[in-house]
Image: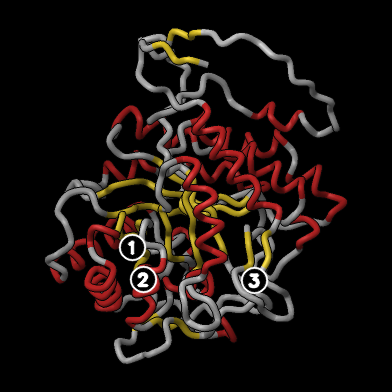
Amino acid sequence: MVLRTLKPAGLLLALGKPVLTAYISRPSSSVQIPITVPLEASSEINPDFLGLAFEQASFTRYAQDDEGNANAFSTNLMDAIYSRTGGKPNIRLGGTSPDYGKYFPDQTEPALPVAEQNNYQDIGHTFIGPSYWHLAKNFPDAVYIIQVPMATMNISEPVAWAQSAVDIIGVDKIFSIQPGNEADLYTNTFTGANGIPLHPPQYQGNLNNESYVGNWTKYVSAIKDAVPSVPSGRYFTAFDTAARFDADVTANQYIFAVDRCFGLGIDDGGVIKEVAAHYYQGSAGTAATLGSLLMNLTITHTHLDQLKVRINWLRANKPEIPFVLSEVGNSLQPTNTYEYQARLGSALWQVDFYLYSMAIGVARINYQQIMHAGYNMWLPVASAGKPAQVFSNYYSQPFVADFIVSYLLVAPGSANER
C-alpha cells in the first residue's frame, strides 16, 4: 500500500477562515491509474508514516497506568490512528536525558526520576532498569527505535542498553538501534540538571564530521561485537541531528553533512537503516503570535525545505536508506505554553507539516511526547493537578491517517472504483 502525492499539500491551511460546504451527489466513476510515475511525485508513503516518540522517563507513564497495568487510555488513542492506516506504531524511545543516562540492572523502577507534567527531564540523572524494557510489551503491535547513549565515553554503557533491550524486547520488535541523540550539540562545556558536568573527559565534547563518524562507527562496532543477537545488515539509525531554526535554519543542510559523512565511511559496513533528524519550528510563543510564528506556511515550508539536501542526496546515492524525522514537536519550551502549543491552530499546523513532509520525501515522522511538554498529543495519566486528557494536536493524526488511506493506490494501471 503506497501513496504518491503530486504537489505539496500546504494549501490545506487555506482553511484559515470558516467556509461553507455542501454535499453534491454524483455517480460513481472509474479512474485509470497511470503506470508511469511522474517525476515530480513524492516518495512512496508507508502506512507506518505516523510514528511516535517518547522521552525516556515519560514512556513509563504513557505505557502504564498508576496501578501498573497497560495504559488503556494510550492504547485506545493509538488504536484510533493505526486502525485507520493498517500500519503499526513505530516508537522511538530516546532524547537528551537517556543520552546521558545510565542502565542499572538491579534497579526495580522502570525509570527514575518519575516524569510528571510539571517537571523537566533530568539530564544527567536519568536511570533505567530492566523493567523499563518490559513496558514495550504493553503495545504488542509496536516496533521500537532504541536510542542508546553515545554522549558517554564509557562504551560499556550503550552495550548494556542494547543487550538488555534485545534480551527483553526481542530483535523482531526492535526496528533499529540509534547511538546518540543530537550529537551535533555535544559541547566541551555542557552541563545538565543542577549544573552536573557532562563534558570531557567523561563525556563527549564538540564533534565535527570526522569525529562524529569515528565515534558512531566505534559504538556500532562495539554493540555488534558484544551483542551477537543483533542482526547483520541495516539495523542502526544514524545522524539524528538537532533542529535548527530562526537565523540558524540553513544549518539543517550541512550539520553532519550526509555526503561528507558517507564519504568518510559511516556506512562502510552497510549497517545504516535510516538517516534521521529532528524538527521544532522554533521557541514557543503566545496566543498572539500563534498565527505569525507557527501557522505560517512560509516559515514551515522554508524550514522543511532545508532538509531537501539530505533527502535528495540519499535518493540519488543511497536509495535504500530513507530519511526520517525521528523527533518532532511544534515548538520548544522547558515547561509548556498550551495557549500556543496546544490549540486548533497548532493542530492545523501539524496537518500541513505532515502533508508537506510527505511531498518532499520524508519517509516517517515520530512525534515527540514528554509529560511536561505543551506540544503533546495527550497526557496519559493525572499529573500535577491535571487530569489525563487529549490535546488538540492529537486530532491531526486521525485526519492524516484518513488522508493516507483515502489515496492509497491499489496497483499501478488498475481501475480504482470511486
Instruction: Give the labeled residue for mark 1.
Output: 179
Classify residue 218 by image quadrant: bottom left
Pinpoint residue 306: horizontal percent, then vertical percent: 54, 37
From mark 1 to mark 2, how far is it between C-alphas?
6 Å
Pinpoint residue 191: horizontal percent, then vertical percent: 53, 78
Question: Which label's residue is closer to the chain start, 2 or 3?
Answer: 2
Instruction: Give the labeled residue for mark 3.
Output: 372
Disc 1 residue type (three-letter) = Pro
* Mark 1 crowdedness (10 Å alpha carbons): few <14, some 14-19, many ≥20: many
Q: What is the secondary structure assignment of the residue under circle 1?
A: strand
From mark 3 to mark 1, how far is it between C-alphas?
25 Å
| Residue drawn at 80 percent across, 48 percent down | 290
The one nearer the camera, 124 or 387, is: 387
Q: Quadrant of the image for the N terminus?
A: top left
| Residue drawn at 75 percent across, 41 percent down | 295
Task: Count the labels in the image.
Answer: 3
Disc 2 residue type (three-letter) = Pro
Badge 1 vs badge 2, beta-carbon distance below 8 Å:
yes
| Residue drawn at 29 percent across, 47 percent down | 273
* Mark 3 crowdedness (10 Å alpha carbons): few <14, some 14-19, many ≥20: many
Pinpoint residue 53: horizontal percent, then vertical percent: 48, 59
From mark 2 to mark 3, how far is it between C-alphas?
22 Å
